Image (cartoon, rainbow, N blue to C red):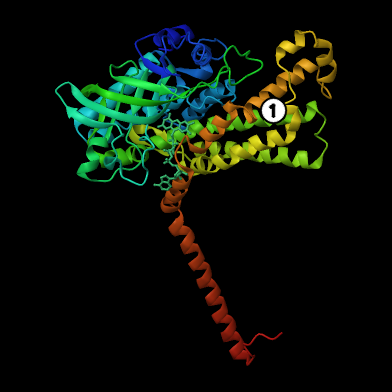
Amino acid sequence: MIRTGRQYLESLRDDREIWIDGERVRDVTIDPRFRSAAESIAELYQMQHDPGLQDRLTYISAEGERTGLSYIEPKSQADLVRRREMVKSWMDWTGGMMGRSPDFMNVHMTGFGSAHEYFARGGERFGRNIRRYYEHLRKNDLALTHTLINPQTDRSKPVHEQNTAAAIVKETDAGIVIHGARMIATLAPFSNDIAVFPSTFLQLSDEAKPYAFAFSIPIATPGLRFICRPAITPLNARAQDYPFSARLDEMDCVAIFDNVLVPWERVFIFQQPKLGNGMFAETGTINQIMHQFATKNLAKAEFLLGVALNMSDAVGIGGFQHVQNYIHEMINTVELVRSCIRASEIDCIPGPNGTVLPNDQPLLTVRTLFPELYPRLVEIIRILGASGLVMVPSHDELSGQRAADVERYYQGANLPADKRIELFRIAWDVSCSSFAGRQTLYERYFSGDPWRLAMLRYQSYPRQQELKQRIWDFAKRTAEWDRREQENKAEKGESSHVTA
Ligand SMILES: Cc1cc2nc3c(=O)[nH]c(=O)nc-3n(C[C@H](O)[C@H](O)[C@H](O)COP(=O)(O)OP(=O)(O)OC[C@H]3O[C@@H](n4cnc5c(N)ncnc54)[C@H](O)[C@@H]3O)c2cc1C
């Protein structure tokens, strides 16, 4: 089933405990700090019902139900392309600036659902639980947040030596009881459920077992509360003045579990550090996730390139050589990310239960490079925009007493003042605002610490042996060549010494 925007908004009106600025939010669909982002996500859901987009965004499931394509279990390269086109449509709608739109977690849970046997290694029922849960999500078109990371209390100690991380504190007939916190859960106020997965790598010890769990429960579960950072959305802001901040603040929260009961049917991993550590890689789910977020990165890079091209036209700077060089750098980023996504699809590999996995190597290149490429794209927008980014009045000025001044002095080389203001407010919001700062932080960290990812890649790069051997083969051929040369020279009685 595909939900409408209205059904999605209705689903957020429950007993969820969301705290911000010292108060509990009554209704995220009405509160001015949350309303616009909720409506923006509702727009995405509603797009699934647009006859012009439906075939691009949805498919008919085996049960004959129209279903969002981010839930598809890809069985062929063509399925990967279809899913990518769906993700790209949502991402283009938001300029790639809503990293945690529901497709992100749908792809996660679909990957885990396809690999249910992995979870069954910890007990048959856990395999059944993850498969049923995936089907439940797919049939109900739910929105999820997730949380992996323990609170940033003392990173020099293992998790069991801290007293802040969420842990299993009790086991009952009904389920497991979780107490403690997790940071962070982006999109939590706008989600139906929260998936809680094992965080980073756990020691394979008894002490780590209380932290080795995976489960998913409704946001409105008793005892579960979220504390949000202050909103980026300026109160009473016009969308045209804050094109992104006013509509796409997906919100980041700390999740606090106050003796929360998780029913057994929602538990996927229980006290199994080894299964937790391998959950993303061994199920192939990380390949699917990287394919989703590389597509987001492509949409984002393309959007910033579009902004730069328009700015360069708007103020007549496109003829300067260094401007062309900067924009060429942005084109390189777009084309690199695009090519990596295509390569991952073309070189896809078999996955669990007849599925295919996009190849991880080109996607790992995007995952580890984009944290460096994205800040550079933003910097180029700032370099090209210069003071034009801050010398932009609000839209009210266009109809205020100084409208004639604005019309005359804010025009561009080829744009009337109102269009130039529109363009430069977009450019400001992606490069200079709080929204822009959070996006840059997000791109650095959302899929893990780039330093540690780089180390892991070094350690696990599958072509290491082949490439190292190639050098020794070359050295061997060189030595053989050299030996033959020496023998030839000796035969001819020539000196083997180099002469200047
Ligand atoms: C905007 C935003 C949204 C996010 N949304 C989500 C979400 O919805 N769900 C979710 O699960 N996660 C989310 N994340 C969290 C993300 O997974 C983490 O930021 C990332 O894994 C890094 O962990 P950390 O932030 O705890 O940094 P830390 O681990 O605290 O690292 C801080 C610094 O110390 C260094 N450091 C710390 N420990 C080590 C170590 N052992 N070895 C080497 N260096 C170390 C790091 O390199 C880094 O420079 C989000 C992050 C951001 C910024």
User: Does the image show residue 56?
Assistant: yes
Query: Residue 88 or 300: which is nearer the viewer?
Result: 300
Query: Residue 169 or 80: which is nearer the viewer?
Result: 169
Q: Position of residue 337 (x, y in %)?
A: 58, 38
- Residue 72, quarter of the rendered image: top left
Q: Position of residue 255 (x, y in %)?
A: 36, 26
**219 left or right, relative to 461:** left
- Per the image, the residue denoted by label 1 is 307
Q: Residue at x 60, y 24 (%)?
A: 95
Query: Residue 465 or 24: which is nearer the viewer?
Result: 24
Q: Residue at x 53, y 76 (%)?
A: 479
Residue extending furthest toward the front = 22
- In which quadrant is the C terminus drawn? bottom right
User: Does the image show residue 335?
Assistant: no
- Residue 280, quarter of the rendered image: top left
Q: Position of residue 246 (x, y in %)?
A: 58, 17
Residue extending furthest toward the left = 173
**76 left or right, relative to 206:** right
**272 left or right, relative to 412:** left
Check disc 1 and report its element: helix, strand or loop. Answer: helix
* Amino acid under disc 1: Val
Q: Position of residue 462 (x, y in %)?
A: 43, 51
Query: Residue 242 or 269: which is nearer the viewer?
Result: 242
